[in-house]
Amino acid sequence: MQTSDVIVIGAGPAGVLAALRAAELGARTALITRGEFGGMAANDGPVPVRTLAQAARLMRGARRLDRFGISSGEPVLDYSRLLERVRNVVSDVRNNSALRQHAERLHVALHERVGTARFVDERTIETESGLRIRAERIILCAGGTSRRLAVPGAELTATHSDAWSLTHVPKSMLVIGAGMTGAQVASIFQAFGSRVTLFQAAARILPSEDEEVSAAVAAAFRESGMVVHESCGTIESFERQTGGVRMTFSKSGARHFADAELAVVAVGWAADTSGLNLPAAGVATNARGYVGVDDYLRTSTPNIYAAGDITGRWMLVPQAVQDGWVAATNAVRGPSIPLEESVCPTGGFTEPEYARVGPTEAQARATQDVVVAHVRFDESTRTIIDDRTAGFCKLIVERETRAILGCHVVGDRAVEIVQVVAIAMVSGLRVDELARVPLSFPTYTGILVRAAYRVLEQLGAQTRRMPG
């Protein structure tokens, strides 16, 4: 049996950062992963999804080349070659990761492709490959897995992960669930030529986003030819059909059917705990099925910590990284650093892109006196130049202090624009200070200065018109 000071289970963003932090603090650290280094984020999440989204973006751009005097034919997608590109990107990201090199320099014992790890007791882990390790402290970073629908025929449906095994783009596709993952899948395959029908049980797609963002993205989806069903009712079953699958759903007492070559379910993300044998270590899960943790990311067993998706707090890479750092620090030094909620920019690589940081307008107005400014993309010089004029930027500011509370963007480069606002918020930059930053012209981020000036105009401050 091998021994270590700290065992980290899972080599995604949370696990890698936890292992690096533990090793930096002087702990002999073992990092165990069922599959490849990088976890879901590198191998089955943001990296491959963003690669597909880039292909979809290029295809949409190719169809607009004539607006710039460039003659070309209709773009044709070779899906097998695209998947080859996805595999190459994933491999390059994994093999060239500075994090892997950092782990090697810190002498982290990396055990890849060892299969599912399980607890023997609260200090001992064994894997399917036969590896057995004992340590005083263990950090769970096993991540999550796609949630399945509990209805007859659910086994006939796919998840976003199954896109990697497709041999061609389906002629038609049902996407059930219109959160971040479902919206991205729907948008990408619509651009690839699938006839996509998107189903959302809630009253609007992207239900956690600002209402204006949801409405704008839904309108753009419909304009692209996608069929969008909001408040779609109850999914009852799936059954095999010639050439595909049929979904039965009911709404307002009536039964409806939807047929397609492929049905993709994206209704949430569950903790990947099924093989861990948590009871052997006394680790409890909460009512939602995630591993329960306290403010120090400590589980119900004092020497075991958890970080990332497995806790159900955030299903995002930046937050998983933060979790990993905090969990490892507390595991090695003892519970001393509580996890604090921080600025959290998020976004989706749909067409159009959308992004946010901070509360929605409704959330902000419910608790504070705010000023809200809108700038349409068709008012911005750079978006006009690039022929990307669909979208808007919304800036939310607290009236008395002029503190920037949040920002919501729909349109090209939305995710990048919001990053700038997140930095401003963390830095404590007030809206009047943002308005004075001489951002380059013409740029997409220049739209922020215009939004800041519109806030100041509402506040009655002296302003001068800035380019943007």
Image: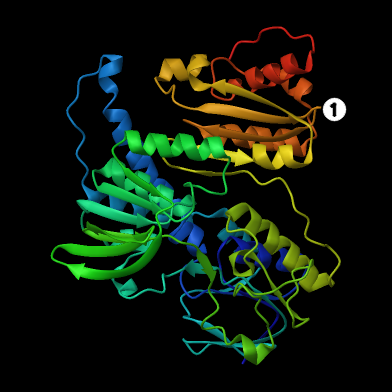
Question: Residue 319's image quarter?
Answer: bottom right
Quarter of the figure that contains the N terminus: bottom right
* Residue occupying the point 72% across, 63% down: 21
Quick one: 243 or 428, which is closer to the camera?
A: 243
Residue that sits furthest to the left in the current view: 242
Pointer 1 residue:
400
Residue that sits furthest to the top in the current view: 464
Q: Looking at the image, is 378 positioned above or below residue 165? A: above
* Residue occupying the point 32% across, 29% down: 61
Q: In the image, is 449 to the left or to the right of 96?
A: right
**Does the rendering let one see residue 2?**
no
* Residue occupying the point 49% across, 74% down: 112
Number of numbered labels in the structure image: 1
Q: Residues within 10 Å of mark 1 (few under 14, many from 20)?
A: few
Question: Residue 292's image quarter?
Answer: bottom right
The amino acid at mark 1 is: Glu
Quick one: 456 or 26, which is closer to the camera?
A: 456
Quarter of the figure that contains the C terminus: top right
* Residue occupying the point 67% across, 88% down: 281
Q: Position of residue 402 (x, y in %)?
A: 80, 27
Q: Looking at the image, is 435 positioned above or below residue 106? A: above
Q: Position of residue 354 (x, y in %)?
A: 51, 38
Q: Looking at the image, is 325 positioned above or below residue 402? A: below
Q: Position of residue 114 (x, y in %)?
A: 48, 80
